[in-house]
Image (spheres, rainbow, N blue to C red):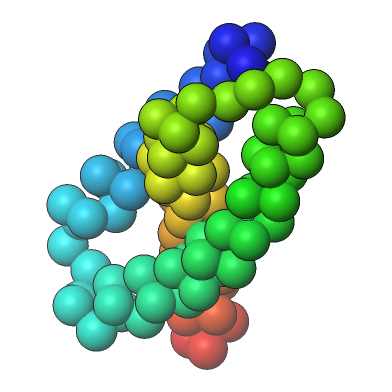
Amino acid sequence: MLIIGALVLPFFIYALVTYFKFSRNDDPKDKKEQILACSSKYALGVFPIGWLILHLYHSFIASIPYNTYRDAMWVLLLFTVQGFAINYYKKRMQQSEASQE
């Protein structure tokens, strides 16, 4: 499990930086809320898939303590997916604004 955590850590750091840069930029509030709503929708959709994978790992490969379940699901998996989704939707909105002009 330590190896998986080490592999996911760079993606988590990238997502964390993306989220903080997004939350501190000067975009209008309604635009930020729209991007956050779309990214949260995808992040929460990943939750059951991640839970299933962790449960199968726990059942067939090695025992996982509850703290690892919680940290992996909430912090690493959901936050990483949301950070990448924010980046995706931010670029998509910029492209749509550029094409409208």
18 with respect to 22 (left or right) = right
- Check the image and report above or below for 49 versus 45: above
**Image-quadrant location for residue 31:** bottom left
* Tally of numbered discs: 0
- From the viewer's perspective, is residue 83 above or below residue 47? above
Q: Seen in the image, is 40 located left or right of residue 56?
A: left
The x, y position of residue 17, in whole percent, is: 34, 36
Q: Position of residue 14 (x, y in %)?
A: 45, 32
**Horizontal placement of 6 versus 97: left or right?**
right
Q: Residue at x 29, y 77 (%)?
A: 33
From the viewer's perspective, tell me whether residue 92 is left or right of residue 12.
right
Viewer-closest of 70 and 24: 70
Q: Residue furthest right?
A: 60
User: Dividing the image into 4 quarters, which one contains the N terminus?
Assistant: top right
Farthest residue in the bottom direction? 100
The residue under the point 55% across, 80% down is 96
Residue at 20%, 76% in the rendered image: 28
Observer-nearest residue: 60 or 17?
60
Write the residue at 45% across / 33% down: 66
Closest to the observer, 72 or 85: 72
- Does residue 15 appear anywhere in the picture? no
x, y percent for residue 4? 65, 19
Do we see residue 1 in this rendering? Answer: yes
Residue 95 is situated, as x and y percent measured from the top left of the image, at 56, 71
Vertical comparison of 39 with 84: above or below: below
